[in-house]
Each structure stands twice: as C-alpha cells, then as structure tokens.
Amino acid sequence: MLQQSIRKEIYNKFSQEKEQYIISEYLSGKNPKQIGKLLNTYNTSIRRVLLRNNIIPLTSAQRWSQRNNVFLNNTEESYYWIGFIIADGCINSTRIEVTSSEKDSNHLLKYSLFINAPIKRVYNKRYDVY
C-alpha cells in the first residue's frame, strides 16, 4: 500500500492547481511545448498530464489543419493576396513559396500579417542575395 502511494506521488509531479492550469492553457490554444516552457518543464510531462485527464494532444500537423483558411474570406484583401501568389509564387504540397527582392520585404511583412504565420528568409548563394 505504501509503495502505491509513493508511485502516485512520483507519477503526479504537479499539484491539482497546476494540472488545471496546464489543461486551461492547452484548451486556450497553447501547445505542450509552450506550456512546458512556461512551467520550466518538459513537454512530455505536459503531455502526460493531458493524457491523464483524458485530453489527447494534437500533433502539429493536426493543429495546422485546424487553422482558419484566410483565403476563403471572400474579401478584397484575400483576393489581392491570391493574385500576389499567382504572380510571384507557387504552391507546393506543404508550403506557399513567394519570390521577392530584398527591397520588397515590407510587402512580405504585410503578407505575413495577413496569413498570421512567419516567413522564412532564404539566402541565394549563386547571386549572393536574400
């Protein structure tokens, strides 16, 4: 009996209040890695807490698929950015690529704000430019 209680204490590393905090943060949209950084612990510990409380954490692919598609808004701005991609970019199976010069970086920043996602800057070795 004593060994079971010791196991439960080791297994339940977080207090009940912390577990409720973890659950509320996860349900508000944060992923286990972000919550782990907030509590200075590993994301696997956060995942265990969620599983123990019958919450199945989503994979990163599932999280991305649940995001709203900003191009389906049927607004003038969404039509503008669709045209921008058609003119200066291409759509692969996993990402949208847009080629632009460094002087147009302001425009890409506006695009980044529209899609609510970061833009990766790539260095072209051949022409020595970004």
Image: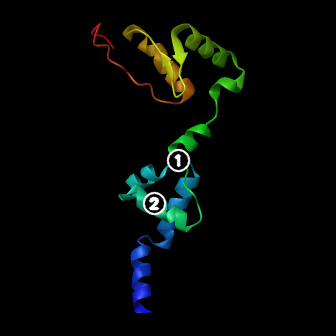
Q: With respect to residue 105, does 59 lie above or below?
A: below
**Closest to the observer, 117 or 7:** 7
Secondary structure of residue under mark 1? loop
Q: With respect to residue 33, does 101 lie above or below?
A: above
**Place of residue 40 in the rendered image (x, y in percent of width and height, measured from the top left):** 35, 57
Please state, as top left, top right, bottom left or bottom right, where the C terminus lies in the image: top left
- Tell me the residue at 68%/15% (across/down): 76
Mark closer to the observer (1, 2): 1
Q: With respect to residue 50, does 11 lie above or below?
A: below
- In the rendered structure, are the residues bearing label 1 and label 2 in contact, judged by CB atoms less than 8 Å apart? no
In the picture, measured across the screen, residue 20 lies left or right of residue 74, that is: left
Q: Which mark is residue 46?
A: 2
Amino acid type of the residue tagged 2 in the rendering: Ile
Which residue is identified by label 1?
59
Give the image quarter of residue 125: top left
- Report the label total: 2
Q: How is the image coloured?
A: rainbow
Please state, as top left, top right, bottom left or bottom right, where the N terminus lies in the image: bottom left
- Tell me the residue at 56%/27% (across/down): 115
